[in-house]
Each structure stands twice: as structure tokens, then as C-alpha cells.
Image: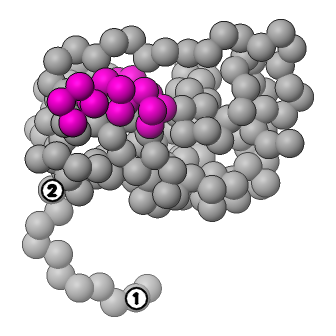
Amino acid sequence: MGQVDPKFNFDFDVIEKGTYAFFIKETNVESEGEGKKSGKRYWARCVVEGGDQDGLSHLESFFEKTKDDFSFSKMAGFLYKVGMLKTLGKVDTSIFLSPEFEERFKKQLPGKKLGAKIGHQTKDKDGKALDNVRSTMQAYYTYDEVKAILGKKGTTKSAEAAPTATSAPEPAKPAPNPLWD
């Protein structure tokens, strides 16, 4: 065991609904915990850049084991929008489980920028009301895309509905490993 300092305030940031620019402050990959069925957890702490929500953070998590690999497909979209995933198309999820990918996830993502549309989660997966509202990323944008969305008036937040996240055309042939050369 170790020593800890008493903590008196441990609320999570709740970012207002809207579209924001973020930078990735830190990342990690956690092993499957005892009693957990979701496998490894990959997370990125994303911090709002500018505006009245400046400095508030959101922890975006991706899990190894989800129905139809939903979480890995979400992570692939996230990685594409920050520029770590180089091509679109099918991605072999075994890449995400390699030690090389885990190291790159932890070392290459901090400092990268992206945009996201923030919504709120008010119920759990069974429809039961949550005690505390949570911020959720509902769409990912490249940093250039979010700047175009927000840039009309030089703002850093858009409460209006943002356009659907754009995607590049699918490549003719997917690369064997779309994450690095």
C-alpha cells in the first residue's frame, strides 16, 4: 500500500452540451480488472481548449470487449480524427491488442488536438436515471473541422447542432497496418 492525501472534492467535470476543440493531456491502457468483463481499457483525457469551458476535461474510454467491437470502432474513428490512424476502411482489431500499439497510444496521443460534439448521459444502459449527469463525446472532428465549425465568430464552443462528422472517402485498398508505416 502507500500513503494518500485526503481528497474532499472529487466531482467529475461536466462540460456543457456543444462542440469544442480539445487537446489530449494524457493517455493510458489499463489491464482488465478483477471482476470486470470488458477487458483492457484505453483512455484519453481530453481538455477543452478556450472559451468558458476552458480547462475542463473529459475522459474518453474505449474497451476491449464490447458488442460487435463497438468500442474499437469508436477508437478507430477517434484515432483517425487525431491523425494517428492513417487510412479509413476495415481495421484488424488485433492491432489494438499489440504491445507496440499500446506504447504508441500512450506516447503519441498526448498533445494531439481534435474536436468533439458533447452531449449528456442521464441514464445508465438499463435506462435507470444516473445520480450525476455525465458528459459524452457524441461525434469526433479533426482539429481543422472543429475550427471551421467554431470559426465563424472566433468562438470555441457551438451550442447549435454541429454538422455530421465528416469522413474521407474509403481507400481503394486498405493498408495492412493503417496505424503506422
Q: Residue at x 40, y 88 (%)?
A: 2
Q: Between residues 114 and 62, which one lies in front from this camera angle?
A: 114
Magenta residues span: 134-154
User: Quick check: is 140 in the magenta stretch?
Assistant: yes
User: Disc number at residue 56?
Assistant: none
| Image side of residue 114 versus residue 20, left or right | right
| Tag 1 residue | 2
Mark with earlier residue (1, 2):
1
Determine whether 114 is above or below 161 in the image: below
In the picture, which quadrant includes the N terminus? bottom left
Q: Residue at x 69, y 55 (%)?
A: 104
User: Disc number at residue 11?
Assistant: 2
Residue type at the position of mark 2: Asp
Disc 2 crowd, CA 10 A, few/some/many (<14, 14-19, 20+): few
Q: Secondary structure at mark 2?
A: loop
CB within 8 Å, label 1 to label 2: no
In the picture, which quadrant includes the C terminus? top right
